[in-house]
Amino acid sequence: MRFYKNLALSSITPNQQQLLDIALVLAILPHLFIVKPVMILYLFISLLFLIFAKEIKGKHLFLFGLFGTLALALSFYETFTFVGLKRLNIFVSLVISLLFIAVVLQRLSKQINFYLLFSPGLFLALSYFFYNTIMMLFYAITVLFIFLVLLLWYRMQSPLIDAFKMAVSLFSFSLPVIIFLFLVFPRISFETKDFGFRGSDTIRTGHDGLMHIGGDALLVPSKRVVMEVSFDEGVPPSNQLYFRGSVLYEDKTSHWAPAKYTARSLINSSTEDATAYQVTLYPHHKKWIYFLDYPLQSPKEANRDSDYIVTSQKPITETMRYDGYSKLEKTLPVRELTALKKDISLLYDASRDDQLYTYMKDFDSQKGLDELIKYFKALKLSYSLQPLGINPKDPLDSFIFGNREGYCVHFASTFATMARMAGIPSRIVTGFKANPLNSYENYLIVKEEDAHAWVEVYLEGIGWQRIETTQYAVGKSVQQVTETTVEEEVQNPIFHRINLTYMYMRYTLQSWVLDYTRSKQMQLLHTILEDVTLLFKFIVFFITLGVIAYLLRELNHHKRTVHPALKALSPLLKKLKKEGLVKKDSETMEHFLNRSLETSKDSRLLQVIQLYNEAHYGDKESSIATLKALIKHF
């Protein structure tokens, strides 16, 4: 600890190259998780050479240039095509790697120019292409503060603690101005701009527009977040957290698929009395845009069909943020079914599931849905994420009359087929069933493992009604199994709550900082002008922030006093300046006085140096008084 204290209080200042090296290390750190291993190896070997090499010659620069070119080729040999470089992250990675090589060669040459001085800021700016997050924002602010401390340390030629105090003063005094400029000049939104590049960050959502009965298309046991949702008035109950993805009509034996016809697009409806929420959907390279049942509006450049499925015109390759307005109802009122839709909603293959067809022969079609549910419950099917004995060629019979264990796809397929055999039009909806345990306040996380399938049946005079088929399972339903699994995984509920709180805070900051666009600005302005109390609080906040910043600056200004020893030398420095002896920026005071002694041959300077060291490092008042008296006789 004494070493660090002495470093902070010492007037010895590192040279410009040392400070630049510190800045480069801080700016390069985030990129070590982005560049290829061979490029990291290149940087590591370059660092070792800088540390241990006694002399650097021209041939060394040539070899490192050749090695850098080889590392670049090995890093991008698979994407050295025009098609590959159309992806923005690959292009930026290439630029970063080229910058690595340029900085290494420039550093080996031991020459400091504008490009080398500018490179830390460029590295830091390029990192935003990969880390557009709150954590990266905090890291960037911290690094910028350290940059400022290093710059002041070099320019002031003072102890590190003085440079740190000055940096704190500048930061605190500029804080109100920064917040004001941030609110007045919102961030430009590039959500609809791709600059000719394509995104490539893909996640597996567990939803692909089909429903495989024998496969695991909807069984993705991953904790990766698909989307984050913020509700205006709290998270709805569990039985209303259904996010629609696809509506499936056609039974293809091994899987269910959407109908081939093109559904009519819906016109946006009034959002009065609707549930309002905001969604952050992460890229999945497909066109589905997820909304709760039933969306009343769709984003720009998106389509909403008659089944209330919203799709983008292009695959979603970048993080998408949109507002949602939905009617959270179990039943969807619709007009009478068209002949085409009714026909495809009643199709089934009796020869394939002959045991199920035999079972349904005794069904009284006059009794309708209630009787159908009794028939389904009588099968005594169990919910299991690891079903055994499902035959892809005969999936329903092997499920129902075999081990009777399956998950949502098997339950939904069985019930939809039974409804069609009973003369009730049915279809399957796939998407996500969010888990309320993954919510905090008005914030909800939807994960890949929340992929789900349920059934909708059409009832004359009522419309399409949602049926959660897993609720009729013997034992635990999907919701109970999911919640039990989460509770078992969360061995420490407090930690789980802390993690949710952190994600909620991060999401809120990201929504209002990283995503503060013109629309957010107008929304904030409209809210402030409508609420006089909020406007008053807003004004008081700015005034308080300004006063605190001013007081911090003044407090730091008074504390940042010149050392008495340096103040005592001031008259001597002026006299030496007249004789042509001027202290250099990179020169310590002791070094300057020794140089002046060699030039002027004035032996009294030797005593000045001795008294200065005693006064500066020993802080002796008698030495300062003697030093002042001695300088008066020059």
Image: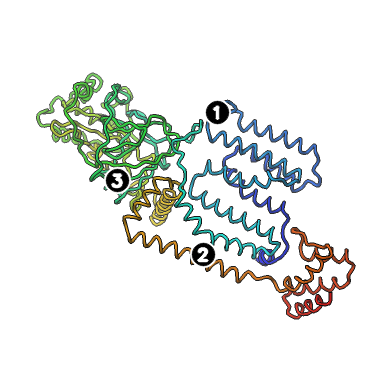
* Tag 2–tag 3 contact (CB < 8 Å): no
- Quick one: which residue is furthest to the front in this view? 578
Disc 1/disc 2 C-alpha distance (Å)? 49 Å
Q: Nearer the viewer, mark 1 or mark 2?
A: 2
In the rendering, at what x and y percent does residue 168 appear? 57, 62
Q: Label 3 is placed on what type of residue?
A: Ala
Up/down of 176 relative to 618, above or below: above
Label annotation for residue 276: 3
Q: Label 2 is placed on what type of residue?
A: Ala
Q: Nearer the viewer, residue 16 or 21?
A: 16
- At x 41%, y 40%, the residue is 222
Mark 2 burial class by Cα count in 10 Å: few <14, some 14-19, many 20+: many
In the rendering, at what x and y percent does residue 623 appear? 77, 78
Disc 3/disc 1 C-alpha distance (Å)? 40 Å
Q: Nearer the viewer, mark 3 or mark 1?
A: 3
In the rendering, at what x and y percent does residue 598 appear? 88, 64
